[in-house]
Every structure is written in C-alpha cells, then in structure tokens.
Image (cartoon, coloured by chain):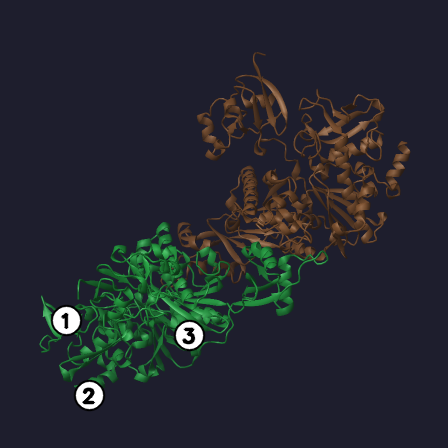
Chain colours: A brown, B green
Amino acid sequence: MQNPITVLFEPYGRRVKVKIGTSIFEAARRAGIKLRSGCGGKGLCGKCKVIIADKKAVENLTEAERSHLSLEEINAGYRLACLTILKTDATVMVPEESRVGALKIQAFGEELLPPLDPAVKKYYITLTEPTLSDAKPDMERVVSMLERNYGLKGLKMEIGVLRELPRLLRKANWKVTVTVLNDERIIAVEGGNTTDKLLGLALDLGTSKIVGCLVDLNEGKTLAVSFIENPQILYGEDVISRITFVSDNRGKLKILHKQLIDGINEVINHACAHAGASHRNVYEAVVVGNTAMHHFFLGLPVKNVAVSPFTPVLRKPVNVKPREMGLRIHPEGNIHALPLIAGFVGADALADALSSRISESKELSLLLDVGTNTEIFLGNSEDMLSCSCASGPAFEGSHVKHGMKAITGAIEKVSINPDSDFDVTYETIGEAAPLGLCGSAMVDVLAELFKWGIINNRGRFNVKLKTPRLRTFDGNTEFVIVWKDESGTGRDITVTQKDINEIQLAKAAVFAGCWILMKRKNVQLNDLHQVLIAGSFGSYINPENAKIAGLVPDVATEKIKFVGNAALSGAKMALISKEERKKAEELSKKIRYLELATDNDFPIEFADAMFIPHKNLSRFPRVKNKLKILG
Amino acid sequence: MQNPITVLFEPYGRRVKVKIGTSIFEAARRAGIKLRSGCGGKGLCGKCKVIIADKKAVENLTEAERSHLSLEEINAGYRLACLTILKTDATVMVPEESRVGALKIQAFGEELLPPLDPAVKKYYITLTEPTLSDAKPDMERVVSMLERNYGLKGLKMEIGVLRELPRLLRKANWKVTVTVLNDERIIAVEGGNTTDKLLGLALDLGTSKIVGCLVDLNEGKTLAVSFIENPQILYGEDVISRITFVSDNRGKLKILHKQLIDGINEVINHACAHAGASHRNVYEAVVVGNTAMHHFFLGLPVKNVAVSPFTPVLRKPVNVKPREMGLRIHPEGNIHALPLIAGFVGADALADALSSRISESKELSLLLDVGTNTEIFLGNSEDMLSCSCASGPAFEGSHVKHGMKAITGAIEKVSINPDSDFDVTYETIGEAAPLGLCGSAMVDVLAELFKWGIINNRGRFNVKLKTPRLRTFDGNTEFVIVWKDESGTGRDITVTQKDINEIQLAKAAVFAGCWILMKRKNVQLNDLHQVLIAGSFGSYINPENAKIAGLVPDVATEKIKFVGNAALSGAKMALISKEERKKAEELSKKIRYLELATDNDFPIEFADAMFIPHKNLSRFPRVKNKLKILG
C-alpha cells in the first residue's frame, strides 16, 4: 500500500491503516466498525456523523455536508463519514448517535407493565364559535366542554397556554386537542386531533450514563431508548469528586446543573429523532437518579449529601415545569422526580425496589443495584431495610486496565478451559471484535481465575503456573484474555494483578453490605426467597460465577435473578401509571435506611469479604461444595 | 430683584421668579408647592426628590445627594430639592413621591374590612440540627415541624426555595420563618423571626391610573398608597386604541405588557419606600382592572375583547408567580388576578360589587363605577345585572380644555352665585392655587350652569347673558371659572361650549346604561334602595348636582352614596381574606351581563339623556320640582 495512513476510531480504540483519499466511512468499514447509514454511504441520509478533532487531517467540508449539519455541529467538528476524505493520520470519534447496535442498555421486561393510567391525557374536542348571545370566554369554552364530555371539573390552564389560546382556537376552526395533567391543569392545546401523539420520557440519571426511554403513553410502548455518557464526568468520575468540586459554590453548581440538562436534552433529541417524534409531544418526564444526580438535576445544593450526617435537601417527590428547567420537552408539561430514601439511596434505587415488586410479597428478597455505588435492599411487604456501599467504578470499566463500558465490542462473558492450556472463550456485545472487558466479564474473570487456581483466595496470581497466558514484566503479572491478533484494538487484552485487586474491593463492599443487612434483620441464607441483581451489567452476569467470586450471598443459583436496568423500568412504570407514582412515595417513607459508615461491623466484614469467595467459607456452603468437587 | 430667573414646576404648571442661587426647595415654597420633607430642607431625610430636565440649569450634584439617590435615579435626573441650587431658568418635575397631599385617590373605608385571613401566612420555627441518627432531609425537617406545631399537612416547597434552603437553615442556626401560601406551598424561608414583615399589595390597574395599596397582612392596615399614570397612555388614551395598536401582533402585546409591569414596579417601589418596607416582604398581590388592562397585565391577547362578540380569553381568577411576570414582589409569592364578568365588565367592576356588598342585601342597589368606561350594576342578593358604557375620558380630565386629573391644584367643587354677577366659588385639592377642573367639578359646572340659565337643557350657552365671565372669541363661547390672577397657571380657567358637549356625552352614556338596566329588571325609581358611585372622582361629587346634571337616576339625595375607589377596596378585601376571594369568584359567575351594543333601546335612550337633566323631565321628578322652585 502506497503511503498508508492510520485512522484511530474512538471510543473503540480501534486502529486501521488505509490509503490517502479513503473516506472515513470506508475506513470504519475496514476497521469492522458499523456506522449508521440510511443510504449506504452516498451522502444522502446524513446519519453517519463523526467528529474529527483535527480539521487538517481531512479534506474541507462539502456543500452536501453543510446541508445535513447544524452550525453548532460544524463548529464542534462534526462531519459525515461518507463524504469526508482522509488526508493524513486521523482520530475519529464516533458519537453515540452514529453507532449501530450499541444500545445493550435498554433491556427491561415489558411484561411487568402496570395498567395504563398516565398523569397526562389528551382529549379531542369540537367547540362552537362564540356569538353575541354566547360570548363565553375562550378558556371557559374549552373547560366547560371537557367537563361536559369527560367529567373533568375545575380545570386550570397554564398562563403560557392562555396566551396562545385565542389565536389557536380560531386558526384550528374550534377543533382542538387538549392535554391535561393530573386531571387538574391544561398544559397544552393543539389544533386538530393529535390524540395519537402522547409521549412521555423515563429518565435514569446515572453517575456515568444518562439513559432516556421515550414511551407512547397511549399504549405504554417504548419507542426509543437513548443514552449518553454523563457529561459531568469532566468534573469527576464519581459523585463525591463532583460534589467536592461544587462544594458551596452556586456558580459551580449551576455549571454542573446546566451540563446535565444539556446532556439530557441530547438524549431527548436522539430518542425523538429515532422515534420520528417531536419533543413538543413529550409532555412528561419521570426522573430517577442517585441522590447526588437528583440534586444536580434539580439544581439543589449537594454539599451536605457528601458530609456527615449526609442530609439531602428533600426526599419527597418533586414536580417542576420543563421550561423552568430548560428541559427540551413540552415547556408547559411536567417533570416528576421520584422520591429518595436517603443520602446514598436515591430515586434510582427506589425505582429498582418499585419495579421489582419486592415490597409487595411476603417472601424475603435481597435486591442489589450494582454500580459505582451499590444500593442494597432486604425485606418484604412487612418491612424493608436498605443500605448503600461504595463499590467503586471497577464494574463500570474504570480503574481496570482493559475495562470498558458495556458497549459494542465489550467482552461480556468469559470462561476458561483448564484442560486446554487455560484457553479462554468469550462473548462480545454486538459480536464485534473484542475491545475490552465490561463489568459482567470481570465477575467471570475473578471466578474463573480462582476456580482453576490461576489466582488464590487472596486474589494473588499463581506465578508458578506454566501457561503463556500468564506473564510477568517488570514485576507486574497479568493474564491474557484475548491475544492481539484476535482483538479489535490490535493489542492483547489482559487482566493485571492490580485489576484483580480492584474487582476484589468492589465485590467485597457489595457482599459486606448484603451480609450486614441480613444480620440486622436476622435473616439466614436459606430465608432468602430471591436475590435480584439490577444495574447496567446485571443482565449478562453469570450467577454461578457471581457466587464463586463472592459478590452475592450463596443461595441456590435459581434464586438469583437479573432485572436489568430496573431503575429505568421503575421510572417508566411511574410514567405510565399514577398508581405506581403513589406507590413510590409510600415506599420512600416505608423503607428504613442503615448507615454503613457508622456500622461497627462493616470494616471487619469488608476485610473478610476481600477473600474469594470469602474468608469464612462456611458462609458459602454451595461454593465450598463445588470447589471440593473441582478439587 | 437682581437677575431674576423663572422656575416652572410640573405637573402643576406653576411658575415662580427667584434669585440665582436659590434652592429648588425654597423656590417651591414660594410657588406655594409643598414638597415632602422630614428634615425641613436640611438635606438629611432625602424625601424632597425632584427631577431636573436640564442639568446645566442647576449646580452640580453634591456628595450628600449621592448618598440619598440611587444610580438609576441620578441618571434619570433626580436631585434633592433642598440641596439643588438654581443657576438659570429651569423646569422642575415634582414626582408623585415628593408631593404632599396629592394622594386624594386612596379614600376607602377601612371599617368595611372583613376578618383577617390572608392566603399568605408566616410561621417562626426552631429546628434541631440533623445528626447521623436523625438525618432527615432539610425540607422534611421544616415541613414536619409545621405539621406538628400548626397542623399544616402535605406542604410543598417551591424549587427556588429548596435551592436556598440548606445554606439558609445552617446560616440562621436552624431558627427560621416560613411563609406559606394557601396552607399548601412554602414560598419563602427566612432566617430568624420575620413574622412581623408580612405584606401584600392590592393593585387597581386603571386605563389612566395604576394604584397600589401596600397592606400589612398581620393587621389589615394600609401602610402606603401609591399611584402613577398608566404608562401605556403613550399607545392610546383609551383601551380601544391600545387594543387597536396591538391587534394580533405578539411583539406589540409584549411591549404593552412590559410597560405595564414596569409601571407597576414603580408603584411598588414608591409604596415600599414610603412604608420603609422591602419588596421581598410583599408575598402576594391581588390585582383588579378592566378586562383590557387585566389581559395586558397577564400578557393575554386582547384583540377579541374589542371586536364582536367581545370574547375575553378567560373570566376565572388567575394565579401566577411574580417571577414569571417580572413583578417586583417576592419572586416565589403569588399574583392573584380577580375574575372578570364580561368583556367590558372587568375585575375592577367585580371588586366594586364585592366591596359594596350590594349582592348580600335583599334591597335593590344601583352601583356605578364612573371612568373612561363606566360599569353599572343593578340588583340584590337574588339577582344581579350588569352593563358597561363608553363614557369617554371627560370625567378623567381629557378632551376638556382645562380638564385635569384629581391631583393637587385641581378644582373639585364649583358653585355659582346668580345673585352676585355669577360669581364662582370653588375648592381645590390640597387647597392649592387652582390649575384646572377634575371630574367632580365638571358635574358641578354642568349642573350650576344649567341651574342658573347660563346654558339651556341642550347645553348651549345663553350668549345673551350679560356677565364678563361669559365671552365669545372667533365664535367660541366660554365661561370663566377662575380669573388668571387667582389661578396657579397664570391663565383664566374656563369651560368652553365644546367642553359642555363632552360632559353631556359622558353623562348621557352613564344615565342611558342605568335606565336600560332598570327597564330590563322592571325596577322603578322608588324601588332603588341606594345609588352607589365608585371611581376616582366619586368621593367629591355633589349628589344634588349629579342629579341635576342627569348623571344618575333622580332618587332621594340621601340614597346617593360615594364609595370612593371601591375597586381597590375590593382588591384589598380579597388580599386580606380568602373568604372574600371565594365570594369574588361566586359573584363573577352569578352576575349576568347585558350587552348595550346590541340593545335596541340604547341609541334613543342615549340621545334623550343628552338633554340636561333629560329630554323626558318626568323621569327626574325631584329635579323638576327643584327647577320649578328656582324658576
């Protein structure tokens, strides 16, 4: 190849060599990265947007691109991959919107849906024109018709709607669709019959990801799920660093608030574009998130959440108008933030508890939402106890050498064959060439390495083991999961001694939390009816390995269930059903909170849980048995 | 006098000659104009503010003045009269706030006040600091204390309050005062005990005047009344011209809306300054105004109010947040606009009906609110009928050669002595030198001129009459009320033939309206228990002359009562009592509206009422009798 140039595709970290004059679209294809496209790379659909950091690396912007990109996008370095010709080495960022198959995140069970009864409803009415003998005011004309036809009494109308009403009624020839919130307030009047356009948004504000789920409120159907990295990540990977950055400073709080809102608006834009919907037909958003994200979202001071006694500003549900928050849904609609439980058990955890129905059964359930912070619930319809533990970002792909988020190319399952020279079998998201390890793979790695004696119960590599996959350079030992010729990055994908330690820290925190809740409620292993695992990595985890790794209590494997993004499910349930919203508020009052920071047993429990699966093997009878069988 | 200079004081139109080096305060004293002062002109109190158009006419601003004036005021040409030394001829504007005795407008009966039960209430509470064993969120801490101590349940808190709450509670050492609206929403939390600072504002938005009444909601006491000319006057003297200017144009509507809000904010500033209060302690405003002003205020499209079938946007009461309107009271407080009755019977008229209690008695009352537009009510507790008539701005001082508003220097009473060469006796507001005639004087003039044969029953001057007061130049006849040597303007104050006609048009419209209501309800003259006259000129009118002029039905004089600015009274009542607010809403539904524009009898009734007192003298039996006695 004459004068080859190298193109690096991010966030995949994949490199490819191509000739000068190649289009980015073609280079991506050769790198095995699929870009969205509706026209097959002919410059017609405008979907294969990419971001070029260095404008000099490519030929100038074409007229055809100008017509597909906004001025804002052009300034941000956006190009269409199919029309952008490479001149030199380049780094190409593939934004979320242009990736194919990356939305692994949306998994949640539609079958759990409660009966439809959303807070926003639409009514199509035909009015008679005013005359001198019936000069009833415009608003009363609308309101009395809704009372007559639908029994809605004492409806109020937003001032913003009143200001447009006279013009609209006359332009629409007195045939209009009225959107009503909580059978109380008229939040929109639209010309003609628009009853089929009634959308809502369920939003999960995670520390690392913002996920939005666009829902058709007439049918309860999910139309689109969209997510972005939390843009606040610039100010700290975890919420504590963000809170420290903000401290008592109103200006800094505004920055983080604004950034979050901008990010959410991006999610809304993606979701609406995907569903072919207008953001003005999204009338309500139900929002969940941990306490810090909840406060950032509402622009509430977060400082006290991070310092003892960890006091949030409020716990109750909050309703705010979208236009007061700058959220890009219908300006007169509603934002409903679900209630919290405590400083470190937020609305997202509450939504987990809601959607999993654990508080509606007499049987005891343990529910874990694993993330940078892991929330744990233990209880039943009689009593619920909760706690929160700092599990760190290892399961989210950070602080681990080849860790990555659960996007296309991430290894999600790993198994090791001890009989075939520790050969590794793996599965990747989107069946793409492997790029790194996501959370579920790390649990597998810990369990598999331990099961086959590659690490001991303290997590130390058995350096005496003879296999090319285990190697030591400069005193650093690592195990090769994927050889470079198979990997999508062109490098070996490995797990280091430091990685193992990070995973141990994470799993130890989670298990110690579970065990202390069981202790406080006097619950024995066999009293547990089910162990539910929520969180973005939950759906792909191997339950057997979760026990061997010592992440969760050692119950019968069939008792371990994965509930996916249960927080988003809970938000969606509260979005489509007022009854669920009421339940959420009752739950937030009912669930007791245990502060691990002041729990005397926690330090020792945490230390013991650093072992694999645990220092005290009698707590893991089933794993102990299995290990015996394996020898 | 060496080098005398001339100083013109506005809006009095009074000139005075003084020496160079005289202070404006001294010049005003010599001109007979009293300025407000708490220190007697020593530069200490900062109350004698005046506005100088030409800065070169006076010595430079002193340091002492700088300390009393805001930067905004300095830029607008404000000075302290006692510290400003004249250099050359000057024009001095005396702003409302510096005038003494000019607030004739506030007259309303405090004795009518309903029991105090305002929508906003304050509670002083002392909270315990959060601890790890009681980490209740800040909001819940406040709310649960209010529930425990005052039985307030399910209180919500404005997001704006939540955002400040954590900082405030800690700074105030957990001793705070909470302001609650409608036992529902927490609209403010203040450090320490501020329960004595609980203010409200009653606002009357007139076509020509904006009047604000600052009320202590703990005692129901009026602390200050302030008013300004309606700044919208630039876009038309009457509301129809303003509506025509705006038409369907959103931008123009915004201009008029903004101008009104700015004007109201000025009224609030004046009233707060006068009462030594902070605008942040004003938590609620109750607003009345005619339908057009009501719509302009709320930013609602007004076009349809002016074209058949005269449909307002709404009639119901409206609640809006001050910060959404830019109104300078507490941003999270409440603005309550009282309901309307119909396109031309607005919230001001409703407030008249409310404060006069006419709908609570079995006796029949006739109530008139006389202004550019005159609203009339006839009825009792069983039934109420209302109408509106275009009486024009004559009674407000416009379209009349020497007409003026009811401010200091305005002649408010006139009587003519036929035995002493038609000598005129008059009284002025503030006992100042006469500057012109206000509405009540015009009624006197019409009656007196007619009584003594100076005009006939068609309003034509009897030019044969021999008196120097009656004179004709170039075919224009006029009657001299005040000779120039007595007047404060240095010119004769006269009433012209054209003026007489304007007053006739105004009074004819009012009487025709009254008579048609009586006809429609089958009410005879003697069925009327009382005739109430509201409006800014109401308090000073001569009831006998009102009948002779043919302005009101000819009932026994003791049945005619003046209720002053009853609209402002009604607004104040609704401000200090939730019960009155409820009554207002019920009234707005109960009062029927009669459209005079489509009434077949109106044109002929109007034409007949142009006569003095009326074409059909049998309708004025008492006047007829009196005229007989006078011969």
Which residue bears the numbered disc 3?
A: B355
Task: Work out whether A107 lies above or below A155.
Answer: above
Distance CA(mark 1)–CA(mark 2):
27 Å
Q: Chain of mark 1?
A: B
Lateral position of residue A516 relative to residue B620, left or right:
right
Q: Amino acid at mark 3?
A: Ser
Could one spot residue B162 in this view of the protein? yes
Q: Residues within 10 Å of mark 2 (few under 14, many from 20)?
A: few
First along the sequence among labels 1 and 2: 1
Comparing B280 with B401, the one in front is B280
Residue plotted at (46% across, 54% down): A161
Residue at the outermost top position: A2
Number of numbered discs: 3
Q: Which mark is residue B102?
A: none
Distance CA(mark 3)–CA(mark 1):
40 Å
Q: Chain of mark 3?
A: B
Which residue bears the numbered disc 1?
A: B478
Task: Work out whether A74 lies above or below A609.
Answer: above
Could one spot residue B341 in this view of the protein? no
Q: Position of residue B352 (x, y in %)?
A: 39, 72
Q: Chain of mark 2?
A: B
- The quadrant holding residue A568 is top right
Q: Which mark is residue B629?
A: 2
First along the sequence among labels 2 and 3: 3
Lateral position of residue B151 relative to residue B460, left or right:
right
Q: Which one is in front in this view, the residue at disc 1 or the one at disc 2?
A: 1
Distance CA(mark 2)–CA(mark 3):
38 Å
Q: Amino acid at mark 1?
A: Glu
Answer yes or no: do the residues labelled 3 and 1 have beta carbons within 8 Å? no
